[in-house]
């Protein structure tokens, strides 16, 4: 299908392009910007007047809850949420039930995702068998099945020798290992950031050292093995300083931060509000300010939604017993724009963190408006606002600390491979 998107404001964060022009799509790829290609026959036209046309969002972590946790969410519900949020590609971690530690499980997930013909799904394979941290998986077989990297998700890796062997294996084949920088012993039982607030509320704390000690280990093992590592969900100013130094040293390191940590701090917990229960926990205003600085100077490569649908009953428990996580796919674009507005950051620069930068982490030729690039796009209204409410969310998980917030911008259409897969009316 040949698609003509006319009169839209095109923003390409990769190049800084910000102009009003027509966009032409053929064979699922971007064919031309501004002027129609020779002999181009239009099959469908979309009037994008008043809308921004942006490369589709790429989310570096979204739990789809299949297989094994269908009572929390289904592939259908979470893929619908992705499209409503303008997310056209997403990475899912291996902490399903059973974990993604066998090629057949990965192939089944990818087949299910393909049959829905919606967002592109990039699974991470389990780094160790059963995510138990004892024996490394057959990474080559999992990669052949479609895994783009390997991770323990939130499961602890207690034995550094196992991690060393895993990084050596990954280096041999050129795989990326995705790691959470959190010492399992220092973080054990913790539900809030260590400090005055956790002490006052009587909550067990997770010290900043749990992140920095884990980072020292990871960085040292990177020096030994030469492995490429992606760090998920950094949360502390001290941790970011270590990452900044490691990048300046030239280590093949990338990292992300969750959109929740971009906006929120530990004081937002208030009186034991379980909607603010996250792992890693929300930290101080100083840490949040350090996150913004690190995003701007390139220390942090990308912002992810950390989308984790949680059953309502699991959030009604006391704070210390409630499940960590929140829905985020449908909020990622709005919250990124909100951050840009609050910090007076140019929109094009802020959008880098959810488009071309995560594409670079995944080594994908997407997340940009370039000739020949996949025609994965989101069209959104920059002047619209919307109220975050359970009945407005397509995700099966309705828990988020942003319930009741009025957020900027609203997705109107999502396009994948040149096909219009989501459209919302302007009413």
Image: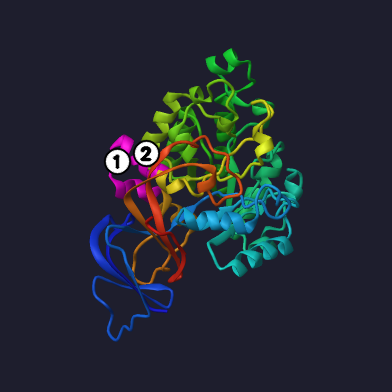
Q: Residue at x 56, y 20 (%)?
A: 271
* Residue 178 sits above or below residue 140 on the image: above
Q: Quadrant of residue 5?
A: bottom left
Q: Is residue 123 left or right of residue 379?
A: right
Q: How many marks?
A: 2
Q: Position of residue 51 (x, y in %)?
A: 31, 58
306 magenta-colored: no
Q: How dense is the environment of label 2, judged by Cα within 10 Å: few (below 14), some, or many (20 and up)?
A: some
Tell us which disc is closer to us: 1 or 2: 2
Q: Residue furthest front?
A: 427
The residue labelled by disc 1 is 345
Q: Quadrant of the C terminus?
A: bottom left
Distance, label 1 to label 2, CA atoms, is 8 Å
Q: Position of residue 92 (x, y in %)?
A: 60, 53
Q: Residue at x 67, y 43 (%)?
A: 163
Q: Quadrant of the N terminus?
A: bottom left
Q: Position of residue 156 (x, y in %)?
A: 69, 38
Q: Residue at x 68, y 40 (%)?
A: 155
Label whose residue precedes the other's in the sequence (1 or 2): 2
Would you say the residues marked 1 and 2 are in contact, meaning their CB atoms lie under 8 Å apart? yes
352 magenta-colored: yes
Q: Is residue 34 visible?
A: yes
The residue labelled by disc 2 is 339
Foreground: 121 or 418?
Answer: 418
For the magenta stretch, what is the residue range? 335-353
Foreground: 207 or 329?
Answer: 329
* Residue 284 sits above or below residue 81 on the image: above
Is label 1 in a helix, a strand or a loop? loop
Q: Is residue 144 visible?
A: no
């Amino acid at each position: 299908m040949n698609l003509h998107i006319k009169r839209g404001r095109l923003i390409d964060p990769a190049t800084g392009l910000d102009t009003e022009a027509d966009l032409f799509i053929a064979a699922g790829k971007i064919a031309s910007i501004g002027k129609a290609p020779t002999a181009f026959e239009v099959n469908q036209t979309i009037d994008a007047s008043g809308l921004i046309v942006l490369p589709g969002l790429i989310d570096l972590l979204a739990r789809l809850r299949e297989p094994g946790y269908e009572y929390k969410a289904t592939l259908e519900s979470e893929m619908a949420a992705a499209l409503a949020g303008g997310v056209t590609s997403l990475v899912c971690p291996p902490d399903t039930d059973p974990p993604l530690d066998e090629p057949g499980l990965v192939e089944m997930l990818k087949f299910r995702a393909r049959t829905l013909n919606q967002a592109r799904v990039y699974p991470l394979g389990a780094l160790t068998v059963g995510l138990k941290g004892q024996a490394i998986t057959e990474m080559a077989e999992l990669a052949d099945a479609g895994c783009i990297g390997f991770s323990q998700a939130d499961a602890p890796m207690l034995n550094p020798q196992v991690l060393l062997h895993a990084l050596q294996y990954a280096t041999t084949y050129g795989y990326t290992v995705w790691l959470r920088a959190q010492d399992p012993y220092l973080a054990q039982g913790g539900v809030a950031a260590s400090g005055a607030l956790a002490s006052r509320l009587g909550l067990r704390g997770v010290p900043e050292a749990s992140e920095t000690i884990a980072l020292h280990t990871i960085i040292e093992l990177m020096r030994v093995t030469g492995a490429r590592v992606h760090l998920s969900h950094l949360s502390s100013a001290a941790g970011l300083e270590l990452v900044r130094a490691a990048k300046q040293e030239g280590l093949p390191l990338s990292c992300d931060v969750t959109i929740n940590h971009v906006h929120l701090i530990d004081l937002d917990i208030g009186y034991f509000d379980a909607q603010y229960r996250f792992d890693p926990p929300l930290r101080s205003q100083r840490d949040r300010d350090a996150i913004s600085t690190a995003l701007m100077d390139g220390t942090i490569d990308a912002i992810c939604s950390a989308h984790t649908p949680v059953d309502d009953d699991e959030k009604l428990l006391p704070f210390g017993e409630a499940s960590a996580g929140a829905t985020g796919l449908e909020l990622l674009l709005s919250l990124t724009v909100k951050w840009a507005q609050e910090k007076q950051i140019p929109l094009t620069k802020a959008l880098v963190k959810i488009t071309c930068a995560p594409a670079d982490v995944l080594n994908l030729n997407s997340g940009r408006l370039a000739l020949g690039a996949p025609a994965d796009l989101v069209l959104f209204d920059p002047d619209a606002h919307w109220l975050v409410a359970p009945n407005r969310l397509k995700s099966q998980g309705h828990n988020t600390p942003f319930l009741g917030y009025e957020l900027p911008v609203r997705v109107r259409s999502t396009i994948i491979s040149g096909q219009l897969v989501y459209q919302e009316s302007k009413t």
